[in-house]
Image (cartoon, grey):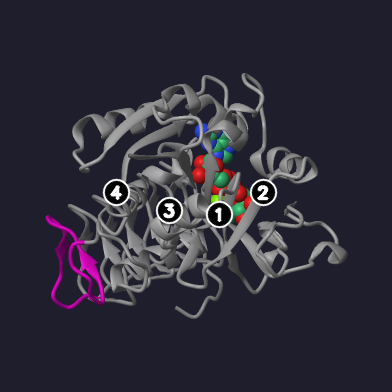
Amino acid sequence: MTEAVLLVGGQGTRLRPLTVNTPKPMLPVAGVPFTVHQITRARDAGISRIVLATSYRAEVFAEFIEGADLGIEIVIATEVEPLGTGGAIRHALTHLESGADDPVVIFNGDVLSGLDIRGLVDSHVQSASDVSLYLTPVPDPRAYGLVPIDADGRVEAFLEKPQTPEEIVTDLINAGCYVFKRSVIEAIPDGRVVSVERETFPGLLASGAHVRGVVDEGYWLDLGTPLAFVQGSKDLVTGKAPSPAVGAIGEVLVLDGAAVDPSAQLRGGSAIGRGAVIAADAVVDGSVVFDGAEIGAGAQVVDSIVGAGARIGADCELHGVVVGDGAVIGSRNELRDGARVWPGVQLDDVSIRYSSDS
Ligand code: GDD
Ligand code: MG
């Protein structure tokens, strides 16, 4: 039996306002909560038991897991106060059933990847490592944890969110999946906030522990920002990102109960939620429309996220924006590049435009 801990307790600050009501891993992506893609991939890699380390809006997970059968045992461990990534792993320990030297897989709860999870676990056991880290190269590593390794794959340092150019010593980053020897988790201090990235990993390196990096250059994405969230959704819909939880791969995904006018154009890996309405001549390109949202006639929604039950008026133009749940955007508004509309906000007709020509 292999066990895993899925870290899903973060606040998802960069995805606000979508995460005001729903924790990031529970946001719908390609038809199911994001966490389901991760849980079913773990299941298919032979993980039979998973501890969901929750904190922020823990009740949303509990409610979902109660009614779901994902073919894997799921246990919920809730931190009353968020304990950080390392503290959450330590807190989950009492819920683990495996033995002292058994491997325990840890997943960040917002990563979509093509990692060979079983391969990482097997090589961890064979090499008798204390910790094995999944690493991937990225063009700009500054927003992540940098992990330089030597020729044998031994981790040399762990530089979380580097601040200076001198710290950019590699393009290899912590890709958000680790295998810990269970006894190493036991050594994490209990009952206080611990960052696995800033405290546990540097501490293990300083003490000479065997920490190994495994580079995988396959698909990888952290869905922590609106742009990345839209990208991840598109990649799941079109099959570029692997997940057992995507029913039918295609150019777009229209879920049951959505009403799409025949003259509307859907493209670019867009996902249309249950009960959503897309009116005549609307264009939805590379976007995510949550359940029950309405896109008015002639509106253009590009690279954007429209929250549950939100209404976008006729002839609006949305490019790269996030509209919160239940917000109402009057007709002929134009919203661009990073604009975020909070849940329930109402915008009158023609309130925001970048040009006066229409
Ligand atoms: N239970 C619990 N408690 N979970 C937490 C807590 C907490 O206090 N804080 C964060 N998490 C969870 C988040 O929900 C998320 O799934 C995961 O831990 C990582 O947190 P993020 O907030 O997404 O971190 P990040 O993206 O800035 O950086 C992390 O991921 C990168 C790769 O995606 C770091 O691990 C980086 O080193 C790494 O490169
Ligand atoms: Mg993240």
Q: Mark 2 or mark 4, which is nearer the start of the sequence?
A: 4
Q: Are marks 2 and 1 in contact (CB under 8 Å)?
A: yes
Q: Which residue is mark 1?
A: 127
Does label 4 point to a residue whose CB lies under 8 Å from ligand 1?
Answer: no
Quadrant occupied by the C terminus: bottom left
Q: Position of residue 84 (x, y in %)?
A: 61, 33
Q: Residue at x 51, y 23 (%)?
A: 79
Q: Residue at x 28, y 64 (%)?
A: 271
The disc labelled 1 sits on which kind of residue? Ser
Tell me: 141 left or right of 218: right
Q: Residue at x 54, y 39 (%)?
A: 181
The disc labelled 4 sits on which kind of residue? Arg
Q: Out of 343 and 114, give the one closest to the viewer.
A: 114
Does label 3 point to a residue whose CB lies under 8 Å from ligand 1?
Answer: no
Q: Are marks 2 and 3 in contact (CB under 8 Å)?
A: no
Could one spot residue 14 in this view of the protein?
no
Does label 1 point to a residue whose CB lies under 8 Å from ligand 1?
Answer: no
Q: Which residue is mark 4?
A: 43
**Residue 348 tag number:** 3
Could one spot residue 285 in this view of the protein?
yes
Tell me: 194 left or right of 113: right
Label 4, label 1: how far apart the Cα atoms are: 23 Å
Closest to the camera, between mark 4 and mark 3, is 4
**Residue 210 tag number:** 2
Q: Secondary structure at mark 1?
A: loop
* Segment colored magenta: 247-265
**In the figure, 221 relative to 60: above or below?**
below
